[in-house]
Image (spheres, grey):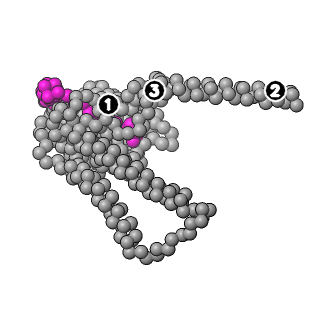
């Protein structure tokens, strides 16, 4: 028996040490990582602040109702229990009781519905905006068009593929960083017109209190007025395909002076990059541009080697479509293929599409001799 108790005691001691180690590790992890948040992100717009206040208000209403209901219930159970000689009171179809338990919930709901309705109406009031930006969701990136300024750009995930594949240490903003953020001025009411090119998306920036579905063929709108300079991050909040988790939203709120400087630079870039459809490109020049277009838009599915993913995404190296008439490949890029993950890439410019076609037809083991010019892509869009 003594030996048995010694063994049990040893196991208990070992278990205690393991538990202490686990608790210590959990504590260290908690210190190393940011504190867990159990509330909304700090609001930086009037609308987000209104939502935050409404959430706190409704929470405390629920707390008061909970305490009142369960307090009365537990008091009644304790003070009127059978063991102390109480008998159940009979008040079936009591008019007073019926009125009380109908009026009180009605008043509670009224006090909750009034501020909630005001917030909902504020969410939909896009009048009096100072800046209008069209937001378009694509598989899997965002397009931003500054309608009053006459230029736009695409915003694509900037997290290195090596981090996604666990070949490198993940950064602080893993999957929440883009190459071209949306830039807006501080203290400016911005109206965002939201739609989608292919499937359902949703434009969501928690700190702004904005979350609006992007629906193909429909135009929805929302607004925000950021009151603090900084970088704010969000994500597509609608399951939109296999790369759904890889289309973040980043908004850079600048001071009005910095925004004016940025705006002037963007207009210069837009003028410089305007397409010249009369230019005749050599295949080598197009392929050089196409390599960058492929890396930004195609490599996730078809891989850098062009071998694709067997059973999921077809190889472009040795593909009959790539080796065939370029018009067939152009049609596939412009219109996608129904029932597959191949989406339309109409959002690319005419030059980018012509370039990626030239690149894929000459890369790897492909030796196709035919290619097309940007002007041919322009004609095919019609």
Q: Residue at x 18, y 43 (%)?
A: 191
Q: Which of 222 and 332 lies nearest the eye of the viewer?
A: 222
State the mark number for residue 33: 3
Q: Please name the residue that numbered disc 1 is placed on.
A: 178
C-alpha span from label 2 to label 3: 40 Å
Q: Is residue 320 above or below residue 3?
A: below
Residue farthest front in this picture: 85
Which callout, 1 or 3, points at the residue further toward the start of the chain? 3
Closer to the chain start, of discs 2 and 1, is 2
Give the secondary structure at mark 2.
Answer: helix
User: Bounds of the magenta span?
Assistant: 243-272
The nearer-to-camera label among 1 and 3 is: 3
Q: Quadrant of the N terminus?
A: top right
Instruction: Identify the residue at horizontal 36%, vertical 32% (top origin).
Output: 176
* Spatial separation of the CA atoms under disc 1 and disc 3: 23 Å
Which residue is at the front of the view, 93 or 127?
Answer: 93
Instruction: Find residue 261 and report its horizontal and vertical position in percent.
Output: 14, 25
**Residue 171: quadrant of the picture:** top left
Residue denoted by label 2 = 6
Question: Residue 19: which quarter of the image?
Answer: top right
Q: Position of residue 349 (x, y in %)?
A: 23, 37
Q: Is residue 76 visible?
A: yes
Q: Disc 2 or 3, which lies upstream in sequence?
A: 2
């Amino acid at each position: 028996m003594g030996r048995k108790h010694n063994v049990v005691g040893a196991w208990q001691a070992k278990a205690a040490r393991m538990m202490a180690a686990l608790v210590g590790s959990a504590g260290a992890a908690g210190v190393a990582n940011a504190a867990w948040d159990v509330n909304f992100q700090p609001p930086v717009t009037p609308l987000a602040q209104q939502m935050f206040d409404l959430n706190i208000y409704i929470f405390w209403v629920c707390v008061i109702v909970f305490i009142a209901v369960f307090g009365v219930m537990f008091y009644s159970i304790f003070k009127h229990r059978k063991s102390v000689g109480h008998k159940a009171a009979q008040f079936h179809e009591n008019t007073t009781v019926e009125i009380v338990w109908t009026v009180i919930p009605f008043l509670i709901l009224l006090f909750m519905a009034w501020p909630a309705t005001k917030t909902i109406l504020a969410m939909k009031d896009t009048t009096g905006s100072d800046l209008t930006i069209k937001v378009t969701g694509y598989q899997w990136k965002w397009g931003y068009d500054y309608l009053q300024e006459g230029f736009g750009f695409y915003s694509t995930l900037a997290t290195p593929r090596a981090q996604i594949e666990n070949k490198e240490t993940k950064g602080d903003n893993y999957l929440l960083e883009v190459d071209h953020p949306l830039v807006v001025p501080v203290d400016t009411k911005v109206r965002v017109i939201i739609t989608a090119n292919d499937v359902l998306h949703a434009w969501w920036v928690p700190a702004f209190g904005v979350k609006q579905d992007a629906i193909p063929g429909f135009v929805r709108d929302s607004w925000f007025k950021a009151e603090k300079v900084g970088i704010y991050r969000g994500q597509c909040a609608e399951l939109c395909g296999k790369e759904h988790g890889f289309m973040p939203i980043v908004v850079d709120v600048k001071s009005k002076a910095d925004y004016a400087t940025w705006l002037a630079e963007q207009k210069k870039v837009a003028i410089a990059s305007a397409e010249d459809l009369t230019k005749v490109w050599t295949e080598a020049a197009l392929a050089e541009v196409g390599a960058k277009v492929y890396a930004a838009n195609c490599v996730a599915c078809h891989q850098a080697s062009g071998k694709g993913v067997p059973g999921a995404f077809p190889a472009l190296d040795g593909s009959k479509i790539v080796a065939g008439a370029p018009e067939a490949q152009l049609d596939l890029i412009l219109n996608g293929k129904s029932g597959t993950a191949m989406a339309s890439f109409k959002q690319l410019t005419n030059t980018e599409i012509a370039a990626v076609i030239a690149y894929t037809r000459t890369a790897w083991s492909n030796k196709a001799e035919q290619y097309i010019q940007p002007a041919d892509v322009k004609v095919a869009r019609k």
